[in-house]
Image (cartoon, rainbow, N blue to C red):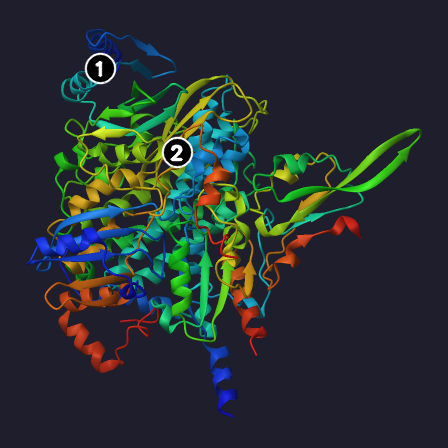
Amino acid sequence: MSAQPEKPPRREESAGLMEYSTESLVPFGPIHPALKEPEYFKLVLEGERIVEVIPRVGYVHRGLEKASESRPWIQNMYMFERTCGICSFVHSVCYAQAVEGLTMFQVPARARFLRTIILEMERIHSHLLWVGLMGHWAGFDTLFMWVWNDREVVLDLVEAISGNRVHKSMNTLCGVRKDMPENMEDRIIERMKYLTDRARYYRDVIDTEETMLARTEDIGRVTADTAEKLCAVGPMARYVGMRRDVRLNDPYAAYDEVPFDIVTRNEGDVHALLRLRLDELVVSANIVSYAVKHLPDGPIRIKIPPTIPAGEHSSHCEAPRGEIFYFAKSAGGRTPERVKSRQPTLANIPTALEMLKGQTLADVPIVLTAIDPCFGCMDRMSFFDIDSNKKWTWSGEQLRQYGINKYFPERAKRQLHGQKFSSAGLGFKEKF
Amino acid sequence: MPKKQIGSAIPEMFREMLEKPSTEAYPFKPIIVPDRFRGKLDIDPAKCTGCSVCSLVCPSSVITMVDMGIRKLADRELKVRKPVFDLASCIFCGECVDNCAFNALEMTKQFELATPNKSDLLMKKVFT
Amino acid sequence: MSELFPQQVGRYAEQAGSKLTTTHKNENVIEVTQEKLKEFLGHLVNDLSTRHLMTITGLDLGQNIQIIYNFSHERDTVHVKTNVPKTKPVALSIIDIVPGAILYEMEVHDMLGVYFTGNPWMDRKLLLPDEWPSDLPAPLLKTSRADEIRKRLDLGVAKQ
Amino acid sequence: MLEKLTNWSRKRSPWVFHINASSCNGCDIEIVASLMPRYDIERFGVVLVPSPKHADVLLVTGVVNAQTVDRLRRVYEQMPEPKHVIAIGACATSGGVFKGCYNAGQGVQDVVPVDMYIPGCPPRPEAIMYGVMKLLGEVK
């Protein structure tokens, strides 16, 4: 951020500057205006190519695991649900499954199906959000607006079922709190069909539209071996051909009663990630339609006592971004002894660093968005030029413009003629 | 692989132009929220018995019980306690509503809660 | 295949002087000593191709700190436990076997103060703030208390 | 006369800068959703700008933790006068569900002066619009 010039460079940074005479150091983050969470990456550049990336996460660290040790089991679920605002329900499901394993109670079938429906709706909303952001960073804002408008369709359904658009607060230990509203079935199926059509249309657009292809093809390559060694999860593993999906490998909720197949791709670039997520969206829409049609009757929850028997149990689920993991240890009391949670973004950071290596600076936002991070600090970078010892800052918007100019010089010229170029005015109003 | 082209989304753009606008007319017209929408918490002081279950289940300690004096019932003296809600930290989960045995609590559909003073968010309806 | 897997893990566990216990469905737990850990993990990762490390969990057991390596293999999960004494919390890094463990080891280092020898990023912080007072105990130890940490950290409240 | 004109234009087109002070993303995506076609807060001239130096209104989400407290202060200092702060969400208003976590503050008002609180977890995009409109109504 631009308040930093008063501060002298840190010792390790200045030591690095002495060492690399041809390399420049780019601090990336942590504050960004448009979206998502603050994170910090230190990029070492050689010319325009990235040779080394040093991450620093922890800007959103709040100390949930410590706080969970002093709160009752059920209240912890609401806290862990608020770990992330995009994939909130899957956190509560995974935590609930870890705790349910310690008790002797089984989750009723209807509750498992309802969980599956909400989980898949959440995946649809998360993937749509991500496709829109990719469109924005690639300089294709039309797609951004369309996709986010379609996202409202699924958010409306989620709100009608659970009562909130983002934090559903619908889960509870051994069941769900709200039943499916009456007369929702037809509406859900019709909306899912609409979303399937839209996803197919977007897939055609990104396959043919040169704006997207130029920015996404052959960018962010990583080999299957590297991704496996670095324990990549979710779409980051599937886009290099690994069949790693918890829904299929270790079915939870009602996934063993729903027919579906996961999507994998072999290209291993950002374009493959786009295709993969849009294909997954269709799969998710089919799962929702199937689960709504085959919703079993019965109770939706079992009341369980506030104390949980002593023991240790772990659970893993497939969040939109990849596998999440919860571990619960109970000493037999009303509060947990220890709850451990691991989010998919942490697992994908080593792979993202590999993806960034060898890329140009212009591709940094698109590659970092491609991992679908729960952070996205592409909006504030300060550059340090070693030769002149001069410091200047670029906003993410300027960086985005830099990327567009690099790939589409004619369009940049048109824009300069057509509208007055200013970094602030470009905001969300820019249309092509 | 289909042929590359520029502007493959233009036909769709024209189609969208002819459709009715997707923007809702919100501040000029009120919106209809779903039946299950969880908005501002509301209490019916007449139904509340002061059992303090809501303050125990609340995940973000919104509810504090305050002493309201002593009530005489036959020859026994009972402490009367009533809940006060600090809606500033309410996370709108509805756990208190589910656990209230007397149906005194309710999630209304009101979501326009913005206020310049944080003290406005303290709900002391039980005192009136 | 998946029925054979726990038996195979059990065989290697016996070589490492331990025993496999299945606590819940598909949850295999092995407790090995710090010396045998890398040998056992080498067999698990290379011979049984259990290459997906889900995470590393750290637990405060009072006298010891327990480190659990959570692996997953198709339907099975394998939890390899090892203990390090609290007085000398040093463990061996496994990033030569599982390169993806690097951030998880940093997390355990931040949260419980275990030093992993062989991890090049041990001197960096992953989650804790830069201004973390070095004399405070690591946050997830049972001796550390949330309200005491809050007093020491600058959360804006102190300035008022 | 000139003052009147400045005030009028200030009310007609407030430029907002959004800072995420360790929020969970829930409020953040609702802020972006309010800029999208369905809600379209740009009808009222609200533009999300990428730099605090261009902004009139600062939208803060999230509990403030030790890593972001200094960044929030510095961003606030960079904003030109007159500046307004809106705290969005239960976390920014009072700490919300994270009250008592060791690395979570108790609301933004401890760090920077707040002009408008929008409670909700997260507030609907309409609630955010209402809050911004209410702030504009109070600005003289």
Q: Residue at x 20, y 15 (%)?
A: C35
Name the amino acid type tagged 2: Pro
In front here: D78 or A404?
D78
Tell me the element at label 2.
Answer: loop
Real-space CA distance between mark 2 and mark 1, rounded to the nearest whole angstrom: 45 Å
On residue C1, which mark appears? 1
User: Subunit of mark 1?
Assistant: C
Q: Residue at x 13, y 34 (%)?
A: A225
**Where, by quadrant of the figure, is residue B58 drawn?**
top right
Residue A144: image x %, image y %? 32, 60
Whether residue A317 is visible: no
Q: Residue furthest left?
A: A22
Q: Is residue B61 left or right of residue A88?
A: right
On residue D1, which mark appears? none
Q: Is residue A214 left or right of residue B83?
A: left
Residue B44 versus residue A98 in the image, above or below: below
Q: Residue at x 19, y 67 (%)?
A: A402
Name the amino acid type tagged 1: Met
Residue A121: image x %, image y %? 41, 43
Q: Which residue is mark 2?
A: C137
Q: Residue at x 38, y 29 (%)?
A: A255
**Where, by quadrant of the figure, is residue C36 drawn?**
top left
**Where, by quadrant of the figure, is residue A117 drawn?**
top left
Q: Is residue A287 left or right of residue A140?
A: right
Tell me the element at label 1.
Answer: loop
Whether residue C132 is visible: yes
Who comes first in sequence, dot 2 or dot 1?
1
In front here: B38 or A18?
A18
Q: Residue furthest front?
A: C135
**Which image quarter is the N terminus of chain C in?**
top left
User: Subunit of mark 2?
Assistant: C
